[in-house]
Amino acid sequence: MLGVYLSGTGNTKHCVEMLVNLLDYEAQCIPLEHPQIIGLLENEDTIILGYPTQFSNAPIMVRDFIKKNSNIWRDKKVFCLNTMGLFSGDGTGCAARLLKKYGAIILGGAQIKMPDSVCDSKLLKKSIEENKTIVRTADARIEQIAKQMLQGSYPKEGLSFISHLKGLFGQRLWFYHKTIGYTDKLKISDNCVGCGLCSRECPMQNIEIKNGKAVAGIQCTMCYRCISLCPQQAITLLGDTVKEQCRYSKYI
C-alpha cells in the first residue's frame, strides 16, 4: 500500500497519513511532487490517493499527473480521498473516472470535511475551537472508514451518478474556467522579502527568486501552500489580502 497526496495546508496530508497508518502502519505516504513517486507507484498495487477539492473538481495538478502517467494505473487498486471546506459533490469521482479510463480498479471514495484553506477569503472561516471540532469529527470518520475497509467494505462517496450531477451543477459547471488548467493569477506584493520559502515549498516549482523577490509563473495549481506559509503574508490568489493563514497544524 502507498499513500499519495497533494496537500497545500496539511489537511489532506493528515487525512491520508491517518487512513494509511490505520490500514497498514508500515505503509509509506508521499506527496505528489516526490522525486521518486513513479518508481514507488509502480511497486505498489494498492494506492490511497488524496487531494483537496477545488470548486467540486480535483486539482489540475492531480488530473495532469494521472494523465501524464497513464501507463502505470492499469490494475492498480485505488481508493480516492478528497478533503473539502464545505461541498464536494463528486470530488472523488473526478479522479476516479480518469483512473478507470486508464485501467485502475476503484476500491471506493471518501469525502472528508476539514477546515477551510482559502487564506484570502472571509468565506467559511471559523474560530480555532470550531476548526478543532471539525478535525476531531474528521478523525472519527477516518477511523470508521478504516474499520470498514479492513472488513472489506469500502465507502463509495462521490462515485455515483447522482453525486456526479451534484458536483457538476453544484459548482463545477459554474466555476469550470477556474479549474480547467493552471492559473497565472498568483499575486506577490511588495511585502515580499525574498526569503525563498514559497519557492522551496511550491509543488509545481512555479515560484522563483529574482533580484531578491519572489516571482510567480503561470503554473499555479491553487493549493494555497505558499500563501499559508509566507511569513510576510505577501502572496494572494483569489482575493487581494490574506485573511487567515490556514494550516492544519493550528488545529491540533
Image (tube, rainbow, N blue to C red):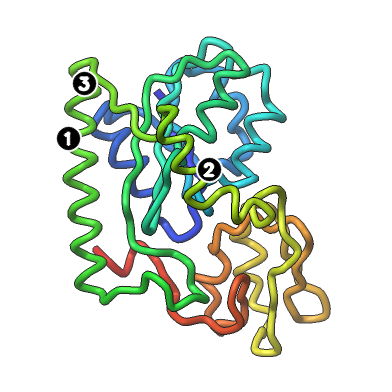
The amino acid beneath tag 1 is: Gln
The amino acid beneath tag 2 is: Leu
What residue appears at the point 37 percent right and 40 percent down from the top-left corner? 16
Circle 1 residues within 10 Å: few <14, some 14–19, many ≥20: few
Q: CA distance from mark 3 to mark 1?
A: 10 Å
In the image: residue 76, left or right of residue 60 = left
- Classify mark 1: helix, strand or loop: helix
**Where's residue 83, x and y in %?**
39, 48
Quadrant including the N terminus: top left
Answer whether labels 3 and 1 touch (C-beta < 8 Å): no
- Classify mark 3: helix, strand or loop: helix
What residue appears at the point 23 percent right and 59 percent down from the top-left corner? 134
Task: Give the residue pinned by disc 1.
Answer: 144
What residue appears at the point 52 percent right and 76 percent down from the top-left corner? 120
Task: Give the residue pinned by disc 3.
Answer: 150
User: Which residue is at the far bottom?
Assistant: 190
Q: Nearer the viewer, mark 3 or mark 1?
A: 1
The number of numbered badges drawn on the structure is 3
Lower position in the chain sequence, tag 3 or tag 1? 1
Between residues 89 and 99, which one lies in front from this camera angle? 89
Lower position in the chain sequence, tag 2 or tag 1? 1
**Where's residue 35, x and y in %?**
63, 39
**Where's residue 213, x and y in %?**
75, 80
Q: CA distance from mark 3 to mark 2?
A: 32 Å
- Tell me if residue 172 comes above or below residue 8 in the rendering: above
The numbered dot on residue 168 is: 2
Q: Nearer the viewer, mark 3 or mark 2?
A: 2
**Where's residue 76, x and y in %?**
50, 15
